[in-house]
Amino acid sequence: MSVAVTVRPESLLLRHPSNPILSSKDWPYSINSVFNAGATLMPDGSTLLLCRVEDRRGLSHLCAARSRNGVDHWQIDPQPTLMPNPQEYPEEIWGIEDPRLTFVPELQQFAVTYTSYSRGGPGVSLALTKDFRAFERYGVIMPPDDKDSALLPRKIGGYWALIHRPMTPLGSHMWISYSPDLRHWGRHRLMLEARRGAWWDANKIGLSPPPIETSRGWLVLYHGVRHTPSGCLYRLGLALFDLENPEKCLLRGDSWIFGPEAEYERNGDVNDVVFPCGYTMNADKDTLNIYYGAADSSIALARASVNALLTWLDANGGFERRRDQDR
Ligand code: BMA
């Protein structure tokens, strides 16, 4: 039996002993909760988290937290970093949520894709920034109902590529769309379908952090939502997509690799949720620091090895087929 087969999925993401690493008690101003943070390394090597902060009205804004080691001694902006601006962007009337960060070398800027909560439902908005202090808003780029989106860091075949998750009456699947200028989007393609029936990722899936570029393809952590009589269960699965044709799924794992187990993941404002929106990569180019919202109440950290994830996927993933009878 090969080593790969013996790797247990539950040992792929290891929780940090200091979890949860950020919660409302750490905040410099009064808030309800902090969770679902985008993450990136800054040029000086520090970690920046752009956190979703829910205020005590229930509306969310984004706030930056910076740390030298990505674990503790966070310097949190003394006031919100990016507030909803419903006067100019009416789609932000009920807040902005769940940012994903992509550094785009061609633009020498970070792309922040986030959920704007409009009267018509959640949509996808985009802003660009160099420093997480000044932002250039592009407004809503995918109308409701749509969320769980991230920009790929480089053009594919001459076009920017955006992964997102529109909701349809037949299920919520991951799609990819293309744009020449980040404003006009088209060539929409289904990228990964939710399974059906009893599967852990039946009916509703979505991108979690932005895809991780590896020599084998785009490694994608996605969440699956299982509806149960006592509420929803958010868990994470793994898939690999072709580097130059990212709508082509090369491998998809059958079982989930991470789910709510720790007390801070099982109990909170929304029980049984692990929801990563960002990761950073260590200098070894293998260790991932995955930042995830826990139970919509705090931010936690788990570490994983890209090699181990790929090895597990090789042993436990299948070629993705669109065959309804399998699902
Ligand atoms: C999803 C998103 C996340 C949230 C999760 C659990 O639909 O809205 O922001 O963490 O639900 O409540």
Image (cartoon, helix red, strand yellow):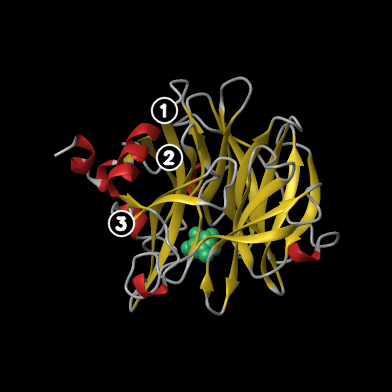
- Left or right side of 31 for 309: left
Identity of the residue drawn at 80% across and 47% down: 180
Mark 2 and mark 1 lie on one chain; the one further toward the N terminus is 2
| Residue type highlighted by circle 2 | Ile
Cα separation, mark 3 vs mark 2, equals 27 Å
Q: Earlier in the sequence, mark 1 or mark 3?
A: 3
- Secondary structure of residue under mark 3: loop
Relative placement, left or right, of 2 versus 173 is left
Q: Hey, which quadrant is residue 95 in on the image?
A: bottom right
The residue beneath circle 1 is: 286
Observer-nearest of 179 and 16: 179
For label 1, the crowd category at 10 Å Cα-Cα, with few meaning under 14, some 14 to 19 and many 20 or more, is some
Of tags 3 and 2, the one toward the viewer is 3
The amino acid type of the residue labelled 3 equals Ser
Q: Residue at x 53, y 65 (%)?
A: 173
Residue at 26% across / 42% down in the picture?
11
Frontmost of labels 2 and 1 is 1
Please say whether residue 89 is visible from this viewpoint. Answer: yes
Q: Residue beneath label 3, please? A: 255
What kind of residue is marked 1? Asp
Q: Secondary structure at mark 2?
A: loop
User: Mark 2 highlights which residue?
Assistant: 21
Would you identify the image quadrant in which residue 265 lies? Answer: bottom left
- Tag 2: Cα neighbours inside 10 Å, few (<14), some, or many (≥20)? some
